[in-house]
């Protein structure tokens, strides 16, 4: 259920007028109108103002702002302010302050400073949300609810007494009895057998590795506690203001490790995502594309909302580079190209005080005379021209398998190599496909994959039997699956599938692995066909698969490095190392065999994405790029195209195509 208003693409951002006097509020609204802002998120961190003392609610100050915005035709995404409980609350309930894995309880002065399991926090949340919803019921400005802020970031797991009590309840619901738990956690190892639920603690900091199955369950539990805190609010909002969509903003690819967004997305009326560039990383627009594709994928392909990004620099990275001219526009339009129906920023006006005063905003400290503001106004005009994009879908022929449980499990202690990181492989494959101009969906390993020509599983370390069967069925029915090393190793309890590696995937890949041979730091091994590998080598024994390439040096010289297994109507590929270079070419071969069509001969500085009838051409490079064979009308300049289109360096062209791509 996407909010009905504003029409077209929503434009605006977090608005924190409580930091400014009334004169500035008036100027704010005038500036918003100048830029075409049509949606702002209000009240995110305003609990202390909404409830200055327990049970006394003050919404008058907010009414004035909401009414002023409404009079100016600006819609409101009203936030529940639970990400920042007030000082009086913490002073009265110090037990709600979260405790870290190291046993240290955090203090007041930051934010996200309450444990989602703490009863006093849940009670106070419910009371406030009920009062807020009742007060704003039927207000025409309020078009959606924004619950909390970025659950799980930075507060993923809490180790306080309330969490431990809830954890024991969760375990009692998850396992039939202690025998089942002991079995699932493999407590026969290191003599950890439990004889009473009360003996089970959170997997706290230890001087050695802690039971990995216990840690994995704690990650599931902790994520679920935040979801319960969200659902508590959502249910109250739905009861009091039915029909008003409810969301919470995800922390993009930057800080999303602790939240299983496949599960979260099901609980939201509309998916909302935040993304911040890694300022110093070259080609950081690829991570942006990945974040946007992930948001669209967890939304089930439905349009989603870019709830936050930055107009310029952030203030929390080691070196906070300002965006170059045109970069903010390219970033914003890339999100729209990949399915967002909004372009929203943190925040509207830069703060003079507090922790984020060096963070950019739509209105910077330099004011409306700045280049930044000019770009913001121009972007508003661009987005009005893009109104017809709203609601349209992005189609992908290739999918990447992404599973948070596998992410968590893979990165627990004592793996065969510290270089085994979930994002390391996921990013490598995503980047290679991005450079091939292929649009990617992400899929859970249990999802129906039949619509994809190619599915890549870069880091599917944890794979249940059911998911492995799903992949098997996909291949047999004609799919093309490419699996990277250290996949299909353990089940949902981090227990190794029986027999030789990769237990869950032996059959579909047509091979077994006798031994892992992780490489030393910086060590590389040669692979036939002109490819060097790093991080990983292993001894493969084909059993149905054929070796397409072999290791030419290192511990597995002479043995397969890339295999192909023709199975039913499809093919399963397996790659046993991390290519230093050449992954893109290798993938291109798989894509070609699978008949994945994509533009040829374009530089990898050009981002090309189709959304509905619109072709987005985003030039991240310093040279103009010409794309052949484009027929349609330029959305920004109205130009008619029938043939080559040249996109200037750093520019974005969007063409409404006449004969939409099949
Ligand atoms: C986000 C957060 C915002 C703001 C922003 C700064 O993670 O939701 O409130 O802090 O970062 O980049």
Image (cartoon, rainbow, N blue to C red):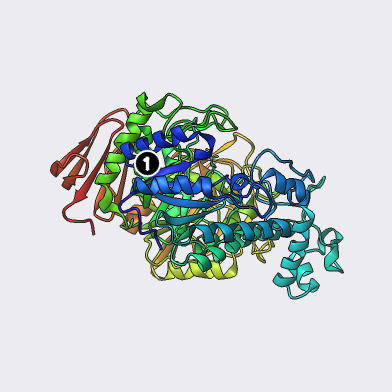
Dividing the image into four equal quarters, which quarter contains ligand 1?
Answer: top right
Coordinates of residue 319 in the picture (x, y in percent): 54, 26
Please name the residue that numbered disc 1 is placed on.
Answer: 332
Give me the residue at 50% from left, 30% from top: 280
- Front residue of this view, candidates 50 and 490: 50
Give me the residue at 82% from left, 62% from top: 200
Left or right, 579 with respect to 490, comes to left
Structural crowding at the residue carrying mark 1, measured as other residues with C-alpha within 10 Å and reported as few (<14), some (14–19) or many (≥20)? many
Coordinates of residue 284 in the picture (x, y in percent): 45, 36
Coordinates of residue 74 in the picture (x, y in percent): 37, 47
- Front residue of this view, candidates 525 and 626: 626
Query: Residue 512, relative to residue 252: is it above or below?
Result: below
Query: Residue 160, relative to residue 499: is it above or below?
Result: above
Left or right, 518 with respect to 365, comes to right
Query: Residue 292, relative to residue 167: is it above or below?
Result: above
Coordinates of residue 72 in the picture (x, y in percent): 35, 45
Residue 233 shows in this picture: yes
- Front residue of this view, candidates 579 and 150: 150
Query: How many labels sit on residues?
Result: 1
């Amino acid at each position: 259920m996407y909010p009905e208003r504003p029409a077209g693409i929503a434009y605006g951002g977090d608005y924190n007028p409580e930091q400014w006097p009334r004169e500035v509020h008036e100027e704010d609204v005038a500036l918003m109108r100048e830029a075409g802002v049509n949606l702002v998120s209000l009240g995110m961190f305003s609990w202390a103002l909404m409830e200055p003392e327990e049970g006394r609610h003050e919404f008058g100050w907010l009414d004035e702002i909401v009414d002023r915005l409404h009079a100016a035709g600006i819609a409101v995404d009203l936030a529940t302010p639970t990400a920042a409980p007030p000082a009086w609350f913490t002073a009265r309930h110090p037990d709600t302050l979260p405790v870290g894995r190291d046993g240290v309880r955090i203090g007041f002065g930051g934010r996200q400073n309450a444990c989602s399991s703490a009863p006093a926090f849940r009670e106070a949340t419910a009371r406030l949300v009920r009062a807020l919803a009742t007060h704003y019921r039927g207000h025409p400005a309020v078009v959606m609810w924004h619950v909390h802020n970025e659950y799980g970031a930075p507060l993923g797991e809490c180790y306080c007494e309330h969490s431990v009590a809830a954890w024991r309840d969760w375990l009692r619901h998850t396992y039939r009895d202690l025998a089942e738990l002991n079995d699932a956690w493999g407590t026969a190892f290191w003599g950890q057998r439990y004889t009473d639920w009360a003996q089970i603690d959170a997997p706290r900091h230890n001087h050695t590795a802690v039971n990995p199955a216990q840690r994995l369950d704690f990650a599931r539990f902790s994520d679920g506690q935040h979801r319960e805190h969200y659902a508590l609010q959502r249910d109250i909002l739905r009861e009091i203001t039915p029909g008003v969509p409810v969301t919470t903003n995800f922390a993009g690819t930057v800080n999303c490790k602790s939240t299983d967004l496949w599960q979260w997305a099901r609980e939201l009326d509309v998916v909302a995502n935040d993304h911040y560039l890694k300022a110093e990383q070259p080609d950081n627009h690829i991570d942006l594309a990945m974040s946007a594709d992930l948001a669209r994928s967890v939304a089930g392909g439905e349009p989603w909302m870019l709830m936050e990004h930055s107009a310029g620099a952030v203030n929390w990275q080691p070196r906070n580079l300002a965006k170059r001219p045109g970069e903010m526009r390219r970033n914003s339009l890339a999100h729209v190209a990949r399915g967002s129906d909004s372009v929203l920023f943190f925040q509207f006006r830069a703060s003079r005080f507090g922790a984020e005063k060096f963070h950019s905003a739509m209105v910077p400290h330099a004011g409306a005379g700045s280049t930044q503001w000019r770009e913001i106004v121009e972007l508003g005009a661009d987005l009005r021209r893009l109104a017809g994009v709203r609601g349209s879908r992005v189609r992908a022929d290739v999918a990447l398998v992404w599973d948070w449980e596998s992410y968590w499990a893979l990165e627990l202690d004592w793996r065969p190599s510290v270089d085994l990181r979930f994002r390391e492989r996921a990013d490598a494959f995503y980047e290679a496909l991005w450079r091939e101009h292929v649009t990617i969906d992400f899929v859970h390993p249990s999802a129906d994959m039949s619509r994809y020509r190619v599915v890549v599983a870069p880091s599917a370390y944890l794979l249940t039997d059911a998911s492995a069967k799903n992949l098997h069925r996909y291949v047999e029915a004609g799919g093309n699956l490419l699996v990277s090393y250290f996949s299909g190793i353990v089940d949902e309890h981090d227990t190794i599938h029986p027999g030789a590696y990769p237990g869950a995937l032996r059959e579909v890949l047509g091979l077994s692995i006798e031994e892992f041979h992780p490489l030393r730091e910086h060590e590389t091994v040669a692979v036939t066909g002109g490819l060097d590998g790093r991080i990983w080598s292993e001894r493969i024994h084909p059993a149905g698969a054929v070796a397409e390439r072999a290791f030419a040096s290192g511990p597995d010289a002479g043995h397969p490095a890339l295999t192909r297994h023709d199975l039913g109507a499809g093919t399963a590929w397996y790659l046993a190392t991390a290519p230093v270079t050449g992954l893109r070419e290798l993938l291109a071969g798989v894509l070609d065999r699978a008949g994945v069509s994509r533009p040829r001969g374009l530089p990898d500085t050009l981002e090309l994405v189709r959304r509905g009838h619109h072709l987005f051409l985003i030039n991240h490079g310093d040279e103009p790029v010409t794309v052949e064979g484009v027929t349609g009308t330029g959305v920004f300049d109205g130009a008619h195209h029938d043939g080559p289109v040249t996109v200037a360096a750093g520019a974005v062209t969007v063409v409404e195509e006449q004969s939409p791509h099949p």
